[in-house]
Image (cartoon, helix red, strand yellow):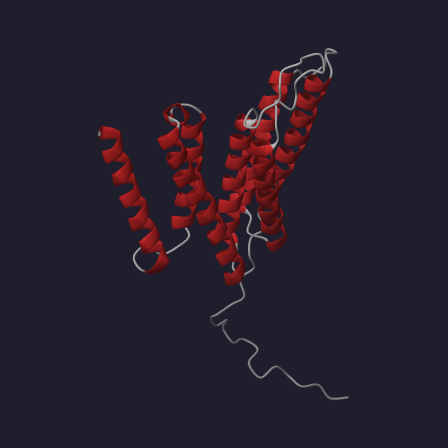
Amino acid sequence: MSTVADPLPNAPETAPSYTAADEPTFARFVGFVGLFALVLGSAAVLASRLSSTPRMIGEGWGFLLAAGGVALMLYHAVRDGDPDVRWMYGGLGVVALVLALAAALVPGPVFAAASVTTEKVVGSNLAWAVGFGLLSLLFLAAYARHETDEPLRTIVRVGLLAVGALLTAGCVAGGAFEPGFLAGPGLALVLLGLGFLCAYLANVDTATGPGYRVAFALGLFGAVVALAAVA
């Protein structure tokens, strides 16, 4: 049985060579720790709100754990571009946006004790709406940063633009009829809307096209608001 020798046994390696992508192991570990802290902190807060029995983890520590968990998960969302990971965080951003809308429209306060006879009104849960909206902004911005499918990126960009425009223009228009609104909750909503607009502009070309028109319209809108404030 004959064998065929390698014609170039000592041939040097030539470019391009295969380069394996580094796995973000540390970022995934941080994300897992953040998810655990978020679940634990959220459970502690809900248990404290729904029951007056003393707990090992109080409501204050629960909020701290949840906030720290979210920060760790955001680090993972920014560092890990794996498709499954970015879709998970993108879905989390959509869920947070739906919760923000529900918190803004559902009469509250939601967590009021049963013995309290306070009349529930729309807008009482505005702090929760702003919090969920901020979470949605951060996770959707991280998703848009890693998404490579152009149709999906377009959908996310349009969503960021629509939410930002509605919050900014709507709250300023509402402040024209109710001046005290912008001095209170309206200011937080306007800042949140500007955050959505900034996330949109960060993912488009602002030199030409729709990005340029949105940036120009935002600057013009700011100038009109400034003149109205001076007047």
90 or 22: nearer the eye? Answer: 90
In the picture, the quarter occupied by the C terminus is top left
| Image position, residue 153 (x, y; %) | 50, 56
| Image position, residue 202 (x, y; %) | 39, 49
211 or 224: nearer the eye? Answer: 224
110 or 30: nearer the eye? Answer: 110
Question: Does residue 218 appear left or right of residue 193 in this picture?
Answer: left
Question: Does residue 71 appear left or right of residue 178 in this picture?
Answer: right
**Against 114, is 188 above or below?**
below
**Against 119, is 202 above or below?**
below
Question: Does residue 160 appear left or right of residue 68 in this picture?
Answer: left
Residue that extends furthest to the right in the rendered view of this protein: 1
Specify the quadrant of the image occupied by residue 101.
top right
| Image position, residue 57 (x, y; %) | 68, 17
Q: Residue at x 64, y 17 (%)?
A: 59
Q: Residue at x 66, y 18 (%)?
A: 112
Residue that extends furthest to the front in the rendered view of this protein: 177
- How many marks can you see? 0
Q: Residue at x 35, y 32 (%)?
A: 176
In the picture, the quarter occupied by the N terminus is bottom right
| Image position, residue 109 (x, y; %) | 61, 22
Q: Residue at x 60, y 41 (%)?
A: 98
Specify the quadrant of the image occupied by residue 68.
top right
